[in-house]
Amino acid sequence: MIRRRSALHPTLALVGLLVVASAVTLEREPTHLLPIASFMTVAVSLMSGRPLEVMGWAIRLLPMGIGLGVFSYLASPDRDPDLLALLPLRVWTMTASALLLAYGTDPWELAWSLTLHFRFPRWISAAVAIAHSVVLKTLESFDELRLALSSKGILTNPLDYFTRSGHLMRVVVHGLAERADRLSTALEARGFDPNRWSHLTPLDLRFIDLLFLLISITLSLIPLIL
Amino acid sequence: MLRLERFKPRLGDGGGPEIDLSIDGPSLISVTGPNGCGKTSTLLALAGLLPYEGSAELMGRELKEYEPAELRRLVRYVPDDPYSAMVRDRVLDEVYFSAECMGLGFGEAVSEVERVLRHVGLIERADDRIFTLSGGQIQRLALASALVAKPKLLLLDNSFTHIDEALRAELAQLLLRIVREGTLVLAAVSDPADLPLEPNMEVTLNCHQEALSVSFSRAALNGSAANELVVEEVWFGYVRGVEFIKALSMEAKSGQVVALVGPNGSGKSTVLKLLTGALRPRRGKIALNGTAPAPPRAAYCPQNPSSYLTERVASEELIMARGSRAGPIVEIRPESLLNVPIHRLSTGVKRVLAVLSSALRGPALLALDEPVAGLDARNKEIMREVIRAVAELGSIIVIASHDRSFVRSVSDDVYLIQRGSVRRVDP
């Protein structure tokens, strides 16, 4: 009945992604980065089951990568054309890694693995996991907030987010404070104490975890071998 | 079992009235009283989450003498709006989290979680995500999380306000079973009619606060133009191919109050959003005075009044709402409420203020989502008067509510929404 919620083992996913991130940061050859970026794209699409959503993230973030690439190209003394492809590939690989962690692991198990295998203090892990649930619930309520404020004439166009920021901040800050207050009362009533928190869900290893780690390391070795 | 002598939660400047009470065995006790009189503070103090004056003995021992962990096992508190206090995303994990907090070993935790999920009838939904549950199922999940501790005292804070008739009957059965198994249940309710079954004893908290009153200066508004809402064969769904609202048709004119009723999750809020232009129909037509509805002509006042109130104090909120209109439009008593920071007002006063603020903008259509949830009888009456007054000024009012007696008292037309179909019923 109780089983691991994360599609990827949280500790191995973290290790794998640290390896990928290091390789991506050190690598300067776009042709070497391409297989890592492709693998991460396929992995995150399969893991999320929502390839279109993943594509949406790419469309939103690639302009930033291209902008960075153009800026670096213009700023570099030797005008290295590789920079035009290198930076977009770096931005996308990092984004895909973060998405893989978000789609592939349960936030509570990920937080627990920080304590279990990386010796993070329990209260930090607990705060990470609880903050995740608060952020999700806040996003859920944001639609209703937007609708109420546009009804009131406070948010009628995108510029209002800046010109009416005082009104907005008051509602959002009070809303968050109220939510945090309720949550802390409820957690205390349930007897939650991060130092006693054990998270007993078994974090068992599966074949896919080892496969993911193996492919990540192999791909990250490409720059060294080549 | 529970003995209170001159018991009074200590909160800010004064807290609520003193309570004397003696209960010998498992039973259902209702705690009622006007909004802002200290019902929640009383429950929190009994749960060991607020300090108190006087004496409170549970199982022959003063509450203050219990170790916190021991008290959390004996006393469980289920908050108002339990969904916002849930931290996991699946049913099973949420209850399991409670077992973990108690420090149960893996095997014991698993069998306890299974036991309580069966007890509250959610075992079939154990692997489902919490956001897919209805309001009643979320209340049952909150109860399951509390019952995993096998508490002797269960404190329920306004747990029956967003519950439809069918789920009230279900919860009544569940409460009976909990009491039969040896738990003393204290349920705080703003309106005694909210409780799904007759309590064994009623505790009423009376405080000496001046009651809220609202009066309109109608001449100042000069009425609104004639308004007309026409909805023809509207179909809507959140997911392609799955129709959530089917063939909705309705009509309303200036001065009419239309109510939408139906089970939890039937689509009442969705219809309000369609009528105010926040959602667009897949098929069919919605016309407010001949054109598609849009803010600010079509205004929406959400369930949570805090999402609507943007000013610092009530007086500023009302000044902003009335805009350039001269002279007093609405008077609120006691006047001291006008200068209290909005976040410090009771939910009841905030709800009335949010409705006034949206009404004073003179919308052609005003949609109110659960306007009386959690209000005491006095504040419900004020809300009824405000809604009728705003309707008489020319607005069309559409409300979504679970409170059938309120709906009967305020509305001209009632539409029942069930499994996506909408039909007119007797008020």
Image: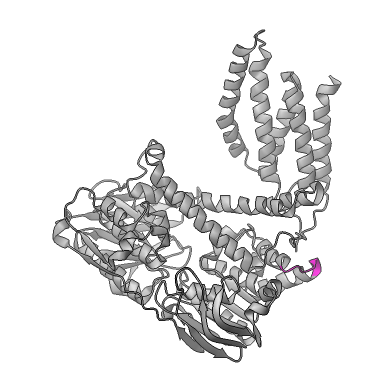
From the top left corner, tell me how far across and down residue B100 is, in percent: 73, 65
Task: Say which of B27 and B212 sits in front.
Answer: B212
Which quadrant of the view contains residue B372? bottom left
Q: Quadrant of the C terminus of chain B?
A: bottom left
- Residue sticking out furthest to the right: A225
* Residue B177 appears anywhere in the view: no
The residue stretch that appears in magenta: B102-107
Q: Is residue B10 above or below residue B253?
A: below
Task: Say which of B358 and A92 sits in front.
Answer: B358
Magenta segment main secondary structure: loop
Q: Residue at x 33, y 75 (%)?
A: B378
Q: Is residue B322 above or below residue B194?
A: above
From the top left corner, tell me how far across and down residue A226 is, in percent: 84, 19
Total numbered labels: 0
Q: Residue at x 83, y 50 (%)?
A: A205
Any magenta on residue B104?
A: yes
From the top left corner, tell me how far across and down residue B375 is, in percent: 39, 71
Q: Residue at x 54, y 79 (%)?
A: B53
* Residue B25 appears anywhere in the view: yes
Task: Say which of A9 and B80 sits in front.
Answer: B80
Which quadrant of the view contains residue A220? top right
From the top left corner, tell me how far across and down residue B223 is, in percent: 16, 57
Q: Is residue B256 left or right of residue B61?
A: left
